[in-house]
């Protein structure tokens, strides 16, 4: 019996995605994509497999050893779209379980021409006769560069060596222009990811107390993710208490919770490869101190004022600047520095950067830091985070509040509006323990 899929996504989503990409390809152009590879962990073990986001976006196939060719004006009709999958291997099936069948691949992707992965180069030799330009795909995230050469880079080198007289171009810009706008089907998946994230956070509110450990809190989140069919975390979760709440990408999650401290969460469920991204901050003992509450309310005020900025035509750069200026005013009210200090500060080293040192918006989708540029005007269908914060190390106060916002033709929609965030609500829920 084949394994039951965790999620059911209509092949119409992937059919539409391929149609949109094919419409961007010039004449006599072919695009070739390959699946992610299993990454070695240690010994004979691998990390859990996660599909390359663009490959999933175009095919819905969540297996390794797969390739996709799109060649819209190929003279051979059956080869305009070809999906190559791993051939059946009885030994591998015995040891590792289900192997994708041709019929399943058709039902998932909507692609009718299915070939074995070991036939790729035979088919390519024929198709290269008709193509002048070949689009290849690699990860082009601006702020990330791995020292390890991945399978997509190796594949690109291999094809360039075999076909040196063809023109090779980047597929990433074309996919970015498409992926940045979420379809209705994608929004449903993102909403489900947000809903699971909500359940996990609410579960922690009845669990957190002094004496527990950060990893125990994470275990509660993991449990809720699993029973709600999430893939897992969309990124390494941050469960930081006390001074750890001031470490922006803290992931050790191994310290004991102490009464009087704050606990900062930053996590998001990944559902059908689409990830939510949420931040909340709560008092370990269930009650904010007056100082903690003042800082918390300051961040929450800015969050509420920032969300209306997520409208068509605005940019992440402009949102960042507006939120930094709003947080600067809140910091003055909190006594962290004065208006006179601001007037005298060096323009390259503003005082607010000591207490808020990160941007407050990024795209989300198949990746937690999804495709999309900071200077790019927002359009309806984009989904971005809104995450102001304040980090006062000398007071062991780290607060970040983050919701996921859908840009529409009218008012923005907060996809996490129903996740507890008001200080009074947090305290009331925690008081029921």
Image: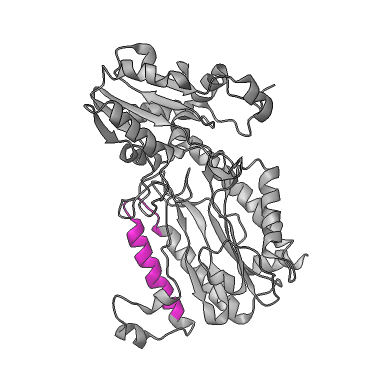
Image coordinates for residue 150, horizontal then vertical, percent:
42, 41
Say whether residue 24 is visible. no
**Which residue is rendered at x = 35% and y = 52% of the image?**
142
Q: Position of residue 228 (x, y in %)?
A: 67, 43
**Does the magenta segment cover residue 329?**
yes
Q: How is the image coloured?
A: one colour
Q: Nearer the viewer, residue 195 or 413?
A: 195
Q: Is residue 1 above or below residue 173?
A: above
Is residue 185 visible to the viewer in this orientation of the structure?
yes
Boundaries of the magenta span? 309-331
Residue 204 shown left or right of residue 145 in the figure: right
The residue positioned 29% from the left and 31% from the top of the image is: 160
Position of residue 408 relative to residue 213, above or below, is: above
Query: Hey, which residue is sitting farthest right in the picture?
Result: 433
| Position in image of residue 361 (x %, y %) | 42, 58
The quarter in which the N terminus is drawn is top right
351 w.r.t. 428: above or below: below
| 178 magenta-colored | no
Considering the whole magenta stretch, tell me its main secondary structure.
helix
């Amino acid at each position: 019996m084949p394994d039951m899929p965790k999620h059911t996504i209509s092949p119409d989503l992937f059919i539409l995605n391929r149609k949109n990409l094919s419409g961007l390809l010039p004449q006599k152009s072919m695009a070739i994509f390959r699946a992610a590879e299993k990454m070695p962990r240690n010994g004979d073990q691998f990390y859990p497999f996660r599909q390359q986001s663009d490959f999933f976006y175009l095919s819905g196939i969540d297996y390794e050893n797969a390739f996709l060719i799109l060649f819209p004006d190929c003279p051979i009709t059956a080869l305009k779209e070809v999906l190559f999958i791993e051939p059946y291997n009885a030994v591998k099936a015995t040891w590792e379980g289900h192997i994708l069948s041709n019929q399943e691949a058709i039902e998932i992707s909507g692609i009718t021409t299915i070939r074995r992965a070991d036939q790729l180069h035979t088919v390519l030799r024929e198709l290269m006769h008709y193509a002048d330009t070949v689009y290849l795909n690699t990860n082009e995230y601006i702020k990330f560069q791995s020292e390890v050469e991945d399978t997509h880079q190796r594949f690109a080198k291999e094809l360039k060596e075999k076909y040196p007289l063809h023109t090779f171009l980047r597929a990433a810009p074309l996919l970015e222009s498409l992926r940045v706008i979420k379809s209705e089907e994608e929004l449903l998946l993102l909403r489900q990811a947000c809903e699971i994230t909500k359940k996990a956070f609410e579960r922690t509110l009845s669990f957190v107390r002094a004496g527990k450990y950060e990893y125990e809190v994470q275990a509660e989140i993991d449990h809720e993710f699993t029973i709600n069919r999430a893939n897992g975390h969309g990124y390494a979760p941050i469960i930081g208490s006390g001074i750890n709440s001031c470490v922006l990408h803290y992931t050790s999650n191994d310290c004991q919770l102490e009464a009087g401290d704050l606990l900062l969460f930053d996590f998001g469920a990944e559902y059908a490869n689409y990830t939510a991204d949420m931040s909340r901050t709560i008092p370990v003992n269930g009650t904010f101190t007056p100082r903690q509450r003042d800082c918390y309310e300051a961040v929450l005020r800015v969050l509420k004022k920032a969300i209306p900025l997520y409208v068509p035509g605005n940019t992440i750069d402009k949102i960042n600047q507006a939120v930094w200026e709003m947080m600067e005013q809140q910091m003055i009210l909190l006594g962290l520095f004065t208006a006179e200090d601001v007037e005298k500060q060096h323009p390259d080293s503003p005082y607010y950067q000591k207490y808020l040192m990160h941007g407050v918006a990024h795209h989300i989708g198949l990746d937690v830091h999804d495709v999309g540029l900071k200077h790019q005007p927002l359009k309806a269908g984009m989904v971005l985070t809104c995450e102001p914060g304040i980090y006062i190390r000398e007071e062991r106060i780290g607060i970040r509040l983050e919701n996921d916002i859908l840009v529409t033709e009218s008012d923005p929609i907060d996809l996490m509006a129903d996740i507890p965030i008001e200080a009074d609500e947090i305290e009331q829920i925690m008081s029921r323990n």
